[in-house]
Image (cartoon, rainbow, N blue to C red):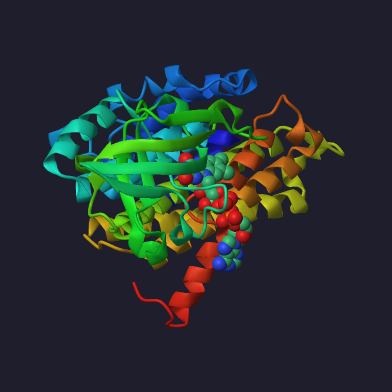
Amino acid sequence: MLSAMVAATARMADFDLSPEQRLVRETVRDFAEREILPHVERCEREERYPLELIAKLPALGLLGPMIPAAYGGSFSDVVTYGVICEELARVDWVVASVVSVANSLAGSSISKHGTDAQKERWLPALAKGECLASACLTEPGGGTDLANMQTTAERVDGGWKLSGTKVFISHAAYAGLFFVVASVDRAKRHKGVTAFLVDPASEGITIGAFPMRTLKRDNLAEVHFDGVVVPDENVLGEPGGGFPVLGAALDMGRYSVAARCVGQAQRCLELATGYAGEREAFGQKIGEFQMIQQKIADMVVRTESARALVYRLGRMKDAGIGRASLEASLAKLVASEAATQNALDSIQVHGGYGVSGEYEVGRLLLEAKALEFGEGTSELHRKLIAEYALGLRKQ
Ligand SMILES: Cc1cc2nc3c(=O)[nH]c(=O)nc-3n(C[C@H](O)[C@H](O)[C@H](O)COP(=O)(O)OP(=O)(O)OC[C@H]3O[C@@H](n4cnc5c(N)ncnc54)[C@H](O)[C@@H]3O)c2cc1C
């Protein structure tokens, strides 16, 4: 049943992918199902960061799909990057998140705004997996209103002194690079925000636990910066020029998160069709009941609608469109809500087993919900989309 469903929708999913992109999908799917999926539930139960799974990515070029080949990456095109994020997220949130943070937030920003020295120092290490990245954006006072950032960067001889706290920081305890935003002048709001490339081993950084109800294998952290001195050469872009760096990074971040949501939505759908084709009630397969079929149909519609928006955004980026904030918001909003709703519907199809420890689908619900916050909440994206529609905001 599972393979019948995959076959039925594969033509749509792959319709306008090139032969090379289809091959990437097949290869990554095969790798992810063989090498990652069988270990995810165990890592979650043991609350253990899956370093050994992440270590399998560089051999296939999966840690540097947005990093140029000249710096050791495997960049081919943005759609291919989306397909990779989708297929990895179909089996594991955390492994997909490692790729998306390293490439969308850190790698793409360094490639676009970095000096030659910054590119040489960080990009090869990111692509080879010698250095994982964390994005330190969210603060205890809020993650949506980034212009109201409390973390400050004070001018000192030859550099900047960072002070403040960041929360919800994925991968922090294992990262070799922190992409940090701080304000050089809080009165200037977004015009004071500056991006820094920070060595997590720097004096004055402490990484504390940030307990979560979900994603225990991610070990999210709270990161404190207590007068951390960062040299001038580690400013990414210009002092006070962090918002343009962030803007482009967030377009790509939203793209990769939206692609990950498509992978999760797809997984929930496959789990539902697989179960509905086996489970029986009243002497027939539950997949023959119309109310179950309605859920399956809605899940297919959500997944394919989200995928179409994500691939279109990828194609726009491949066509050289620098900023595509409206399209990024559309893709992120639709895909993240599709992933959550598909998880809910898939759990319902599983009956009580949907929330038992025996089935993977229950875990997917909170993981999907978490993707409605990262890279902009649903409310923020609705606000942005409405402002574009009303002419209150321009690309
Ligand atoms: C699993 C997970 C991993 C994460 N990883 C990272 C990471 O690696 N790095 C990082 O920096 N952050 C990370 N985050 C944090 C995430 O980016 C923030 O949770 C998100 O930006 C929202 O910020 P907040 O939680 O402070 O909510 P707030 O900004 O306080 O918002 C609270 C509520 O108010 C709504 N709201 C706010 N402003 C408006 C408005 N203008 N109009 C309407 N509604 C509004 C929001 O949509 C939300 O519903 C992660 C979060 C999760 C759950």
Q: Quadrant of the C terminus?
A: bottom left
Which residue is most to the right? 282
Above or below, 307 relative to 51: below
Above or below, 113 relative to 20: below
- Tell me where residue 46 sits by quadrant: top right
Give residue 109's position: percent from left, percent from top. Answer: 27, 47
> Is residue 17 at all visible to an observer of this figure?
no
Side (left or right) of 71 relative to 61:
left
Measuring 42% from the left and 82% from the top, which residue is drawn there? 391
Which residue is most to the front? 157
Above or below, 149 relative to 282: below
- Tell me where residue 232 sits by quadrant: top left
Side (left or right) of 355 relative to 108:
right
Q: Nearer the viewer, residue 105 or 153?
A: 153
Measuring 65% from the left and 34% from the top, which residue is drawn there? 363
Q: Nearer the viewer, residue 156 or 256?
A: 156
Give residue 275's position: percent from left, percent from top. Answer: 69, 35
Give residue 178's position: percent from left, percent from top. Answer: 36, 36
Q: Nearer the viewer, residue 374 or 159?
A: 159
> Is residue 4 at all visible to an observer of this figure?
yes
Measuring 52% from the left and 48% from the top, which residue is drawn there? 139
